[in-house]
């Protein structure tokens, strides 16, 4: 079964009549504040390729504490990063209900496909409805096994992105009268938990390349609140986190090409380090602005980035890796803060004086966040 995974980004105005039984109002993108589920933005949960992927993803974090395994259906293939747009729409819709203080937020969403397609910037012709159904099929048939957010006493959780979906068809016209989708418990819980979603720009939906889309999500996750220093990550680590098929050499070539083009919305990318072991620095473009007058913002000329990482990044004489346990504890006890922005601030603070080096980095970081939360909550 061949599947075309490219969806257009233009829109039409025709809208079929909505069946009366579908009484949930789904906001258009102009009304909906877009949100992405935080834990899906960094780990390799989706295929980045437009062709059908049949090779599983098997990822283990560098500290061995986190794993993500993704298994495709042999007929439909693996859910793609384009299919994940449906999940972004669902996360945005439910988060909007949560923000408005609504009770009994449903795990099953009823909607008209026309509204969903418009919200994620897709065409609304017959072919796009067909591609939407194929995407829903991949989201339901792809199996994910992970220990991220496994409940106490359990080693892992297994799920598909959506538990089920239904398309109610008009028997006379063959057109959809409305659809419904039931989200997986794991994904639903991730949307509703404190700090579980991050805002994204609508321009994300205009990104056509799979690697570019994934880089945007990584940048949003890590560099979104990191300030003008941004966030840097090694190419080898980036490769592992992507779950991309193919050789590292090819991945490196394609990522460096994307970085040099520097056309991903909202984020500025640059290369640091050596040719053998390059680092990709990601910085929010708005953080490259400086105030000229109280009500005016002017862009700085691009600053020369250092060739040596040690000239730009604090070089700490001890490991400064946050464990998954620390990240979970911080989110549970101090929800709402950008952990990686606080980490960058903490690392900078450590380097200001030699006597600030902690004996237990993760314990000291937790104490830092506790003090920060108390002072700024």
Image (cartoon, helix red, strand yellow):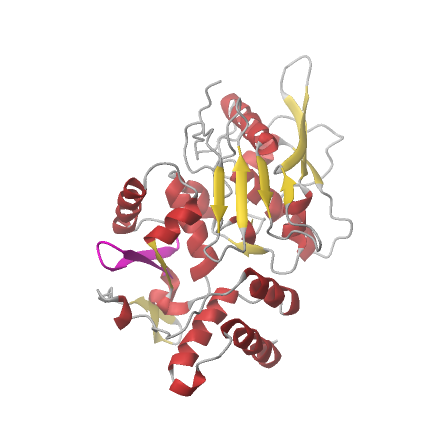
Q: Specify whether 18 is left or right of 139.
A: right
- Indicate whether residue 373 is drawn in magenta: no
- Residue 240 shows in this picture: yes
Residue 200 point in image, percent of width and height: 49, 52
| Segment colored magenta | 265-284
Residue 242 point in image, percent of width and height: 42, 45
- Residue 353 shows in this picture: no
Q: Main structural element of the magenta stretch: helix, strand or loop?
A: strand
Residue 318 point in image, percent of width and height: 41, 73
Q: Between residue 375 and residue 109, name the one nearer to us.
A: 375
Question: Image point 39% across, 37% down: which residue?
Answer: 245
- Indicate whether residue 275 is drawn in magenta: yes
Q: In the rendered image, which quarter is residue 331 located in? A: bottom right
Q: Specify whether 342 is left or right of 32.
A: left
Q: Measured along the vertical axis of the image, is residue 38 above or below residue 139?
A: below
Question: Image point 58% across, 28% down: which residue?
Answer: 137
Question: Image point 55% across, 27% down: which residue?
Answer: 73
- Considering every residue shown, the one lying at the far top of the view is 172
């Amino acid at each position: 079964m061949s599947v075309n995974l490219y969806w257009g980004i233009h829109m039409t105005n025709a809208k079929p009549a909505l069946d009366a039984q579908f009484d949930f109002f789904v906001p258009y993108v102009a009304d909906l504040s877009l949100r992405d589920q935080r834990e899906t933005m960094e780990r390799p949960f989706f295929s980045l390729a437009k062709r059908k992927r049949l090779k599983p993803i098997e990822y283990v974090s560098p500290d061995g504490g986190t794993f993500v395994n993704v298994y495709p259906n042999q007929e439909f293939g693996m859910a793609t990063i384009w299919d994940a747009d449906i999940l972004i729409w669902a996360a945005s819709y439910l988060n909007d209900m949560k923000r408005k203080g609504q009770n009994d937020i449903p795990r099953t969403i009823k909607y008209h496909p026309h509204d969903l397609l418009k919200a994620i910037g897709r065409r609304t012709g017959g072919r796009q409805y067909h591609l939407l159904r194929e995407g829903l099929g991949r989201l339901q048939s792809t199996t994910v096994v992970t220990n991220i957010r496994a409940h106490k006493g359990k080693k892992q959780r297994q799920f598909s992105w959506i538990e089920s979906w239904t398309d109610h068809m008009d028997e006379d016209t063959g057109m959809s009268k409305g659809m419904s989708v039931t989200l997986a418990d794991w994904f639903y819980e991730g949307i509703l938990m404190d700090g579980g979603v991050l805002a994204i720009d609508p321009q994300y939906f205009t990104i056509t390349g799979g690697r570019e889309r994934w880089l945007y999500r990584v940048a949003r996750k890590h560099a979104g609140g990191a300030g003008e220093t941004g966030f840097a990550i090694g190419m080898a680590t980036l490769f592992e986190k992507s779950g991309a098929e193919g050789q590292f050499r090819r991945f490196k070539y394609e990522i460096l090409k994307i970085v040099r083009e520097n056309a991903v919305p909202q984020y500025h990318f640059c290369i640091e380090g050596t040719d053998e072991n390059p680092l990709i620095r990601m910085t929010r473009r708005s953080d490259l602005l400086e105030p000229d007058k109280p009500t005016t913002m002017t862009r700085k000329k691009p600053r020369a980035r250092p060739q040596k990482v040690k000239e730009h990044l604090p070089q700490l004489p001890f490991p400064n890796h946050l464990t998954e346990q620390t990240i979970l504890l911080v989110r549970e006890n101090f929800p709402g803060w950008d952990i990686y922005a606080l980490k960058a601030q903490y690392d900078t603070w450590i380097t200001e004086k030699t006597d600030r080096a902690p004996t237990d980095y993760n314990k000291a970081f937790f104490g830092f966040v506790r003090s920060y939360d108390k002072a700024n909550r």
